[in-house]
Amino acid sequence: MSTSEQTGPEATRPPSRPAKRVSLQTVERLSVYRKVLEELDRDGVENIHSHELAELVGVTPAQLRRDLASFGTFGNISRGYNVYQMSRTISRILGTDASQSVALFGVGDLGRALLSYRGFEERGFHIAVAFDADSEKVGRVFAGRRCYHVDHLEEVLREFDVHMAILASRPEGLQTLVDRVCGAGVHAILNFVPKRVSVPGGCFVEETDIASKLEMLSFLARTEAAEAESQLSSLEPGEPAEGLTA
């Protein structure tokens, strides 16, 4: 039996490590594949072909197959991919098939919103503990999590066995906080603070600036509107605008 004809669990079980280093773009696409597959599974879809899945996620079938080929063999030619099995396999690849504890730094408006967001739990991330420098917040419970003072982060992170962190604190002293967090055994940081930080080797940080995303969307919307206005102004009187007619 050729690898392209394998079926059953073995057909969606990836090797423990990919044969070569995988790009971050591939990892980001894997996350999108997994999200779409979970939606399909909830809708009762059992199998899907590569061209169908590629169309749903907005990539070419060739790109999808290249991404998956980095991790092994998925599905078979006649029936396509098993939606549930493939979703679970990608979860194992991403390391989200088991719950991971996360620490949140900053219990302001954004921090409290993140504590209440259920999407993290659905993706395998549990915010287990929160920190803040405000003495009025320390000791209180927010969305079921107790808030500790940042002065005690080293011992608390060890107690909760946390190796990932989310930053939603003030920008003042942020680099010092990151240095301490990484020194305490945290290897991955999601930074919502609009200030860039550096991390030592073996640690990873993802900068997420919500305002900059809104700026990008504002630019795209304004550019599209300007192009549409330019198209209309260039028309002769009574000439229909392509794509704008009823």
Image (cartoon, rainbow, N blue to C red):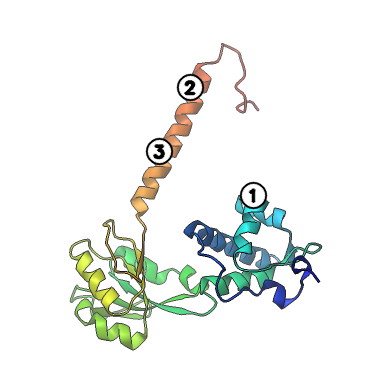
Q: Earlier in the sequence, mark 3 or mark 2?
A: 3
What's the distance in space between the residues labelled 2 and 1, CA to CA?
32 Å
Residue at figure coordinates x 46%, y 70% from the top left: 120
User: On the image, which quarter does residue 82 sit in?
Assistant: bottom right
What's the distance in space between the residues labelled 3 and 2, CA to CA?
16 Å
Picture layout, residue 74 above or below residue 186: above
- In the rendered image, which quarter contains the N terminus? bottom right
Eye-nearest disc, 3 or 1: 1
Residue at figure coordinates x 51%, y 27% from the top left: 228
Picture layout, residue 78 above or below residue 165: above
Q: Earlier in the sequence, mark 3 or mark 1?
A: 1
- Residue 113 marker: none
Q: Residue 83: where, in percent of width, then height?
A: 69, 67
Q: Which of the two residues, 226 or 65, is positioned nearer the viewer here?
A: 65
- Visible in this render: residue 41? yes
Q: Specify the amino acid type for callout 3.
A: Phe
- In the rendered image, which quarter contains the C terminus? top right
Q: Which of the two residues, 132 or 163, is positioned nearer the viewer here?
A: 163
- Residue 219 marker: 3
Q: Residue furthest top?
A: 237
Q: Earlier in the sequence, mark 2 or mark 1?
A: 1
Q: Residues within 10 Å of mark 1 (few under 14, many from 20)?
A: some
What's the distance in space between the residues labelled 3 and 1, CA to CA?
27 Å
**Label 1: which residue?**
60
Q: Residue 203: where, in percent of width, then height?
A: 35, 70
**Label 2: which residue?**
230
User: On the image, which quarter does residue 34 sit in?
Assistant: bottom right
